[in-house]
Amino acid sequence: RHHVLSLADFTPEEYDTVLQTAASFREVLSRRTKKVPTLQGQVVANLFFEPSTRTRSSFELAAKRLSADTLNFAASTSSLTKGETILDTAKTYLAMGTDMMVIRHREAGVPQAIADEMDRLGVRVGVLNAGDGQHEHPSQALLDLFTTCTLIDSDRPRLELLKDKKIAIVGDILHSRVARSNIWSLTASGAEVHLAAPPTLLPQLFADFTTNAPGKLFLHWQVEPALENADFVMTLRLQKERMTQHLLPSLREYHQRFGITRDRLRICQPDVKVLHPGPVNRGVEISSDLMDDPQFSLIQAQVTSGVAVRMALLYLMGSSKA
Ligand code: CP
C-alpha cells in the first residue's frame, strides 16, 4: 500500500502485517540501541496543520528510530500564515526530497487531496493520514488494535484475537475520527462493537456505517447496555472545539450519565481494560482515578504502542517504494 488514508479498505492480511511488523519493532525498542538503519537517507515530513502531542511526537520518534531524516512543520509558524496553499506547502516539501508525508488537518479529505496531487505528479511519495477532521485516524486505530491484541497474545498479535470480544466505544462518537477508524478495524476483526453516547453525539446513521463486516455494530443512547460484559471500553474526549451547536448536556451531567468510572465497570468482564486515545478531559469522559489505575487503564500502553506501530507503517510504506 502506497498511502495509508483510511482503514475502510484494509484487508485482514494488511492488519496482521502491521501488527506483526509492530511486534518486531517493539522488540527493537526494548534493546539498548533502539535504532535500525532501515530508512537511512529517506525523509519523513510531519505536516501538522492542527495541534497534536502524541501523534506528531511518536511519528517523529518512529522515523528517527528507523534512521530517517525528519522535517517538522507547524501551521502557525509556517508560510501558510502568508497565504501559501496546502498543496503548495506539500509541493515545497516534495522539492526538498521528502519521501513520506504525515498529514493532520482539521478538514476531512486533506491527506487524500495531497496524496492525489502526489500521484498526479507521478512521484512515489507516501501519504499517511494522521487525523483529518471527523473522518479518520488510521494510525490511532492500529495502535489501539496492537494494544488490545498484544494484551491477549503478546508474541503473536493478530486481528482474529478480538473475534469473540465485546468492545464498547463511549463518548463523542459524532466528532470522532478515532471512532470511525476503530469501527472499521474492530468490525473487521469480528468483534461486537457497541457505541454509546447521548443521541446528539451518536446519530442513527452510524447504524449503517459498516456493511458486510464480520463483526456487528450496535448503537445505545445509554451507557449500561454497551458496558455490560464488555472486554474493552474505549472512552472518547468530548471535542468541544468541533461543537457548533448545543450538542451536550452540562459536562457534569455528561459525566453522571456517560462518564467511565470504576463503579460503572462493575458490569463489565472482571478483567475489563479501558482505553482512551487522548488527550483526556479528566473527570468528564473518564474519572481521574480510573485513568491512573494500572489495573484497568491502557492509556499509557497505547502511547507506547504508538511508536512501534508508526515505525511499522513508515517501514511498510518505505518498502512499498522499492
Ligand atoms: N490521540 C491523538 O491523536 O492525540 P494527539 O492529538 O495528541 O496527537
Image (cartoon, rainbow, N blue to C red):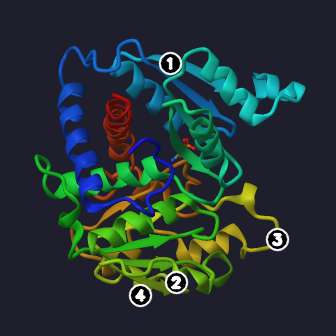
Residue hosting label 3:
245
Could you tell me if the residues under marks 1 and 2 are in contact, i.e. CB atoms within 8 Å?
Answer: no
Determine the secondary structure under disc 4: helix
Cα distance between the residues tagged 4 and 2: 19 Å
Mark closer to the chain start, 1 or 4? 1
Q: Position of residue 319 (x, y in %)?
A: 32, 31
Spatial separation of the CA atoms under disc 2 and disc 3: 24 Å
> In which quadrant will I find the N terminus?
top left
- The 10 Å Cα crowd at callout 4, few under 14, some 14 to 19, many 20 or more, is some
Can you tell me which quadrant of the image ligand 1 is in? top right
Residue mark closest to the camera, 3 vs 1: 1
Residue that numbered label 1 is attached to: 70
Q: Nearer the viewer, mark 1 or mark 4?
A: 1
Q: Is residue 303 left or right of residue 163?
A: right
Label 1, secondary structure: give it. Answer: strand
Could you classify mark 1 by the number of other residues whose Cα lies within 10 Å: few (under 14), some (14-19), or many (20 or more)? many
Q: Where does label 2 land, which residue?
A: 208
Percent x, y of residue 74: 68, 27
Indicate the amino acid at tag 2.
Answer: Asp
Of the pair 27 and 189, the residue shown nearer to us: 189
What residue is rendered at 24% in x and 74% in y?
A: 165
| Residue 113 position in % (x across, y down) | 66, 46
Closest to the camera, between mark 3 and mark 4, is: 3
Counting residues from the start of the chain, the first of labels 3 and 4 encountered is: 4
- For the residues carrying marks 4 and 2, which lies nearer the camera in this image? 2
